Image (cartoon, rainbow, N blue to C red):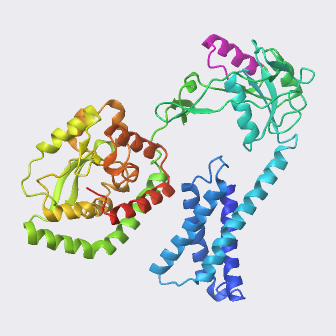
Amino acid sequence: MLAATDAIAVAAAGALSQVLRAGDLYPLEPGNWGEAVAVLTMLVAVWIVFARAVGLYRNRRRHELKSIVKASCAAWLALVAISFFVHLAPSRLVVGIGLTLTMGSVVAMRMLVRRCIKFFYSRPEFAVPLVIVGANSFGVYLRERIKEELTQYEFLGFVDENPPANAVNGSNGTNGSNGTNGHAGPNGYASHNGHLGLNGNGRSHLRAVAPPPVPILGQLERIAGLSFEHPNLEAVIVLPERDHEQIERIIKLCERYRVRWRMMPRVAESAALTVEMVGAIPLIGPPGSNIEGLNFLIKRGFDVVVASLMLLVASPIMLLASIAIWLTDGSPLLFRQTRVGIHGKPFELLKFRTMRAQSSDSVHREYVKEWIQRNAAERTEAGGAKIYKIGLDPRVTPIGRWLRRFSLDELPQLFNVLYGDMSLIGPRPAMPYELELYQEWHRHRLDAPPGITGLWQVSGRNRLSFEEMVQLDIEYIEEWSLAGDMGILLRTLPAMLQGSGM
């Protein structure tokens, strides 16, 4: 619904911007409808892609305004770029007016949609009464999420055989709330402090805290009476600490009184989970790569377009670099090396040759072994700067050292991106002999195509340890977004221009 209303708002903003700029409906006159429809369709399509990339279609509202601004700027910038290639020349005033109207109209339409949804959910024929079985910190956390997020649920209260000491009876023992969407009624129920925490790997999990006063409707038998009072009653079972027999008894009770039930899985106490349905079987597990399905296609399309443009711009530089290598050290111009790509698939990486021909890789093999196993392979360059990379390598040629300083030796990897072996942004491409030294969790960095640059590079370049680099790679894979890729790419360019590469 939000995507549909966004499309209407963006199309209206684009059309209105032309009207305000020209003072008439050109190019919306009958003879120009084809061009106008094509431009507006392109604008809407680009907007939807960027809106999805920045998370505007997830059930989160914390940074919605900021995300709308990002998506609007990116969509109009992309429209200008595409128009340039198809020989259209949109007015700068139209772009400025359209950008402003897009942000305003999307915000207004989303507010209107939510008001309508809230109105419908507030009516008894649409609201779904909900009871939570389990007056613990997890149940209280769920109740708060229902209150904060836009849902159809009307929270009634908790049901528990062993209520906590701070339990409060619901109003007359029947209803702990007279509001809709979990807005607390006059029962003395206070807000709680349940929240999401982070474990050592940066993944979210529920932190068990002492629950504050909660409205208790009664014990499990109370479900029977509630099912007669509310024919469309639903129950959520949040008892991860109870044994299987107790859970089965609660489920049978819900089935007997035709109460739709759902359950919190036991393993959800320790880590964030994803649920995938295969037929009628739910498969529960930890989150994996976010670069799958449509996200993979979006990332691949972004790589192809940007890599092609970069090759066009960088072709004179690549020609000069090739001539410099040939004049100072002869051929070959390119260095080819087998690297490990996504899911362990080997590929041939291309770089400008920066070392003397026939140089042995034994020095690098020993260094990599020390870097991974000890995780503290600090070396000190002249001037006292600590680095995690081989410094002052005698195998590097003078022109090679200059190419490395500005990361120009990596420009041929743009062809690897076009071939599909690499991405512009991703984990550092691993070498085959590295895999023998990996721990099991290190291999998660192979769940995405390797990149020319990445989160690890803009976060510290040569100053990161191996463990820190792997943690950043996994964080990037699990939380990927197109907006994040753009941000990393923009942060990489200043580092290259400053000559901070090695």
Above or below: residue 295 compared with residue 214: below
Residue 111, x across and y down, in percent: 76, 57
Residue 384, x across and y down, in percent: 27, 48
> Looking at this view, is 248 or 453 the one in front?
453
Residue at 61% x, 13% y: name it: 244
Q: Quadrant of residue 268?
A: top right
Q: Is residue 335 left or right of residue 293?
A: left
Total tally of numbered discs in the picture? 0
Q: Main secondary structure of the magenta part?
A: helix
Residue 329, x across and y down, in percent: 8, 66
Residue 9, x across and y down, in percent: 70, 67
Q: Is residue 190 left or right of residue 482?
A: right
Residue at 36% x, 52% y: name it: 457
Image quadrant in which the N terminus is located: bottom right
> Looking at this view, is 459 or 335 the one in front?
459
Magenta segment, which residues?
Answer: 238-256
Above or below: residue 442 compared with residue 500: above
Residue 249 on the magenta segment: yes
Q: Quadrant of residue 367?
A: top left
Above or below: residue 463 compared with residue 238: below
Residue at 33% x, 46% y: name it: 463
